[in-house]
Amino acid sequence: MLNRTKYFRKLCLSGSFLVGLISLSSTANAQFIGINADVAISYSAAPGKVDGFSVGISHPTPFIPNIGYSSVSFKDKETIGSDNDTSSVLLETATTIKTINLFYNVPFPVVTITVGFGLGGVDTITTIDQVTSNLETSVTEAFFHIGLPFWNTVEFHLGYHLMSFSSIDITKSVTLAGNYTTDKNYSGGMTTIGVQVAF
């Protein structure tokens, strides 16, 4: 009778241990969708405060890219003089950059790396003495995130998004009285911090 009780206890302990291992492995493999949310903390071409974010949806299917969206906006205000220094104008420019991107998650033993690229558009609205100049152009994006995962479901990461497009003349659509150099190059890098939650 005593041997049967010991055997039953060992069987229960072994079964509990096995069930625990199975539940842990099923928890680790139950992540089908990951949601990324990042906020911009700076943009290298912006003269001051920026408003920006990046979001993305990850899936476990190999070789098929994940999809995301990035946006950054900022304002630039300056007074420029004409080429002959006889007059000046005040320019207030609001710039918005938006992209749709594709990315891959590359697992490493301790950290995770995300690399991606995107395409989108740049919209600049410049006000010159109550006259508005609105221009649009295309932009390309390349980015990476480096993250530190916790509990196999939450990851905190730091990202850098490089936005590249050609210089634009922000007053091209209006006629100014005088010769002004108003070409701007707002290409730059957006630094983000964020989190990913896996389900």
Image: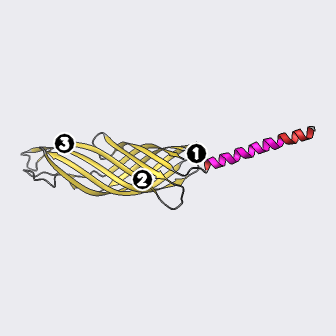
Q: Is residue 12 magenta?
A: yes
Residue positioned most to the right = 1
Separation of disc 1 and disc 2 at Cα?
21 Å
Query: Is residue 178 visible to the viewer in this orientation of the structure?
Result: yes
User: In the drawing, does residue 166 fall left or right of residue 13?
Assistant: left
Name the residue tied to disc 3.
78
Farthest residue toward the bottom? 63
For the residues carrying marks 3 and 1, which lies nearer the camera in this image? 1
Give the mark, 1 or 2, whose residue is nearer the N terminus: 2
Q: Position of residue 9 (x, y in %)?
A: 83, 39
Q: Magenta includes 139?
A: no
Highlighted magenta segment, given as a residue range:
10-27
Instruction: Name the residue carrying label 1.
Output: 152
Which image quadrant is residue 4 in? top right
Q: Residues within 10 Å of mark 3 (few under 14, many from 20)?
A: few
Q: Earlier in the sequence, mark 2 or mark 3?
A: 2
Nearer to us in this view, 87 or 67: 67
Residue situated in front as seen by the camera: 172 or 99: 99
Q: Residue at horizontal 50%, vertical 49%?
A: 34
| Disc 2 residue type (three-letter) | Gly
Q: Position of residue 42 (x, y in %)?
A: 35, 42
* Image position, residue 14 (x, y; %): 79, 44
Amino acid marked by disc 3:
Glu
Q: CA distance from mark 2 to mark 3?
A: 34 Å
Query: What is the number of the mark on residue 68?
Result: 2
